[in-house]
Amino acid sequence: MGKQMKILVTGGYGLIGHNVVQRLKRQDHLVSIIDNKTNYGIIPQAEIDYLMEERAVKIDRHPLYTASIENADTIDYVIRVQQPEVIVHMASFPRQKVVNANPAHGADVMMRGLINMLESAKRYSVRRFVYMSSSMVYGDFDDQVTEDAICSPIGQYGIMKLAGEWLVKDYARRTGMEYVILRPSAVYGPLDVEDRVAAKFMLRAMRGQVLSVNGASETLDFTYVDDAADGVVAAALEAGAANNTFNITKSHSVSLLQAAEMIVKIVGSGTIECRDKDADFPSRGALNIDKARQVLGFDPKVDVQEGFENYYKWLKESPYWNP
């Protein structure tokens, strides 16, 4: 897929999304974006405004449609006008906590919004549909889980992400459209919202506050945003990715306690308090990425120590978090 292509990225102003747009632009692809710039009802509006402005600078100029994917007429209009060959569908409620806070709206976005995208993709003969799923589809899992493992999601977020995978595959079966399904894990890095594990730990440490660890031995496969974005771009462009599912992670599990200790050491302040595991979240390990390495040439470079150091450096220089 060396030629210039028309690619639509939904959620193109998101943490991973704006990095994906940047990379596609560098490769001279014609990128358009759908993003509603939402605060999900739980993130301070000033924080979202700051992040959107900073992400916009990195994205530069692309056709942007500020729209919600639940609006079928708007989605149909965008896809009809832009005529993308590839859709990278990243617009979603981003994690379990946000879905739990508003399950009905979460279902509208994650299910109805996805169907709107797929219907218009079918109508206008989109060639490839890349769907951003989640490692949460596996439910509880140990290290080195592979893409063919049985999925037993715990919680509505993981359940809807898995249902989304099945919907994408069904549309592909019926229409001949290619699909690529991606399962990332614990993505973090510059321009993230505060309300995620790595960000929350980092900012609490910077404020000299307590880092609350919900389950000291619980692990996450922390993945630096640059690596995750590289995986998404490869999934959009690589011919051999068609009709496959890939884990897109660092493939290295770190316990929540280890992560907290690492961050306190990097920042030089903060204390740690261990609590019981959060029952709403599955126990997770590291995902096996052999398939992504082989087919996509996926090669995550940034280990957790370096990633946390990079993120801390950015936060220290941020006029919003460190005025």
Image (tube, rainbow, N blue to C red):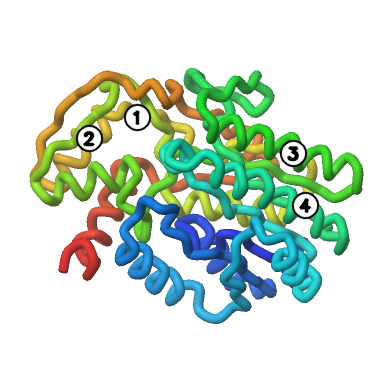
The disc label shown at residue 260, or none: 2
Number of other residues with Cα within 10 Å of mark 2, as a class: few under 14, some 14 to 19, many 20 or more? many
Q: Earlier in the sequence, mark 3 or mark 1?
A: 3
The residue at which mark 3 appears reads as: 244
Q: Amino acid at mark 1?
A: Val
The disc label shown at residue 118, or none: 4
Q: CA distance from mark 3 to mark 2?
A: 35 Å
Q: Is residue 5 visible?
A: no
Residue 149 coordinates in the image, percent (x, y): 64, 21
Helix, strand or loop at mark 3: strand
Q: Earlier in the sequence, mark 3 or mark 2?
A: 3
Q: Amino acid at mark 4?
A: Leu
| The one of 59 and 14 positioned closer to us in this rendering | 14
Q: Taking 270 as reference, is 41 above or below it?
A: below
The disc label shown at residue 17, or none: none
Quarter of the picture holding the N terminus: bottom right
Q: Residue at x 11, y 42 (%)?
A: 209
Q: CA distance from mark 1 to mark 2?
A: 10 Å
| The one of 75 and 223 positioned closer to us in this rendering | 75
Instruction: State which mark lies toward you, 2 or 4.
Output: 4
Number of other residues with Cα within 10 Å of mark 4, as a class: few under 14, some 14 to 19, many 20 or more? many
The residue at which mark 1 appears reads as: 254
Q: Earlier in the sequence, mark 2 or mark 4?
A: 4
Q: Amino acid at mark 2?
A: Ala
Q: CA distance from mark 1 to mark 4?
A: 36 Å
Q: CA distance from mark 3 to mark 1?
A: 27 Å
Q: Residue at x 22, y 35 (%)?
A: 260
Q: CA distance from mark 2 to mark 4?
A: 40 Å
Q: Are marks 1 and 4 in contact (CB under 8 Å)?
A: no
Q: Are marks 1 and 2 in contact (CB under 8 Å)?
A: no
| Quarter of the view holding residue 98 | top left
Instruction: State which mark lies toward you, 3 or 4.
Output: 4
